[in-house]
Image (spheres, rainbow, N blue to C red):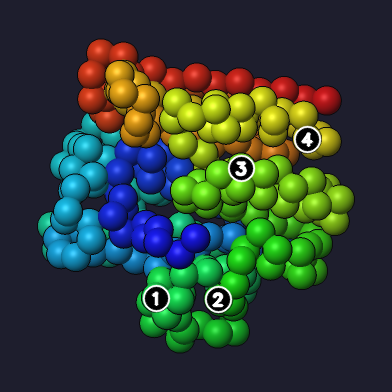
Amino acid sequence: MLSYRHAFHAGNHADVLKHFVECLLLQHLGNKDKPYWYIDTHAGAGIYALTQGFATQNAEFENGIGRLWLRDDLPPALNAYMEVVRTLNPDGTLQLYPGSPYFADQLMPAGDKLRLFELHPSDSQILEQNFGHAKRRIQIETRDGFNGIKAFLPPPPRRALVLIDPPYEDKRDYLHVDSALREGLKRFATGIYAVWYPLLQREEARALPDQLKKLPAQSWLNVSMQVQLPAQDGFGMYGSGMFILNPPWTLATTLEQTLPWLTRALAQDQSASFNLQQHEN
């Protein structure tokens, strides 16, 4: 399906959780003086305008990054995430929001590589405009990232973060996530794989985390955040989660320390909560 445009949702509560966790994973990989790759199956446009275009229709960012923008009591773990957002908004006015590739480009060492997939031709073209100047470092392909990542696994440095972030508008995405991870683990068992997923009342969304727990990974961590009560009509996203295969051992502790604050900051009603699970084989 090519109808989905992430610009409608840029900077919302789900983006905050996803990109916060992404930054923690990038920082972990960067702590070692060894190269690594970043591989993104659904890279989007890379940078999003918040004050014009699609993002203004529902202004979802106001209940996401907008809740954090002027806070002066951020937990230390959020500093890297917020600093990247500030680099796009140097005058102090929140006008732009970075996508996942921008966070990676900013936080990765200069010599490390990014491999980006985006199937939507319009977003892929914008992605090229935003990152085309760095062709030695960043390779962009207009194709299905679920299949595309096979060509890059295992990556030459044998270290990588693979982000899988489909829109899930097509129910088949839930199956594609599972099959892409199974294939990925066969090719590159030690990689860090991070999957974003929505909290929805549809059966496929509710079942996905349990499916991912059955994958043959050495360890996993599942973090989710609910920001509001599910709607009575059964529609709408009431939160989101990140499922990480082969997570850093320090990640759970960092999330335990930070998520109470972040959940309160993003809460839209009194049902807001977070859940954190981890397992090692």
User: Could you tell me the amino acid type at mark 2?
Assistant: Thr
Q: Is residue 140 above or below residue 51?
A: below
Q: In the rendered structure, which amino acid carries the disc numbered 3?
A: Tyr
SS assignment at label 1: helix
Can you name the residue that lies furthest to the top here? 270
Q: Nearer the viewer, mark 2 or mark 3?
A: 3
N-term-proximal mark, 3 vs 4:
3
| 41 lies left or right of 179 | left
* Mark 2 Cα shell of 10 Å, populated few (<14), some (14-19), many (≥20): some
Q: Which residue is mark 3?
A: 174
Q: Earlier in the sequence, mark 2 or mark 4?
A: 2
Mark 1 vs 3: CB contact within 8 A: no
Looking at the rendered structure, the kind of residue marked 1 is Ser
Q: Amino acid at mark 4?
A: Leu
Residue 88 in percent (x, y) is at 27, 64
In front: label 3 or label 4: 3
Q: CA distance from mark 2 to mark 3?
A: 21 Å
Residue hosting label 1: 122
Q: Distance between the Cα atoms at labels 1 and 3?
A: 24 Å
Q: Position of residue 252 (x, y in %)?
A: 58, 27
**Residue located 15% across and 64% down the image:** 52
> What residue does disc 2 label?
142
SS of the residue under disc 3: helix
Q: Residue at x 50, y 19 (%)?
A: 275
Q: Quadrant of residue 272?
A: top left
Pointer 1 or 2: first along the chain: 1
Above or below, 122 against 185 in this view is below
> Which element is circle 4 on?
loop
| Mark before the other along the chain sequence, 2 or 3 | 2
Dot 4: few (<14), some (14–19), or many (≥20) neighbours within 10 Å? some
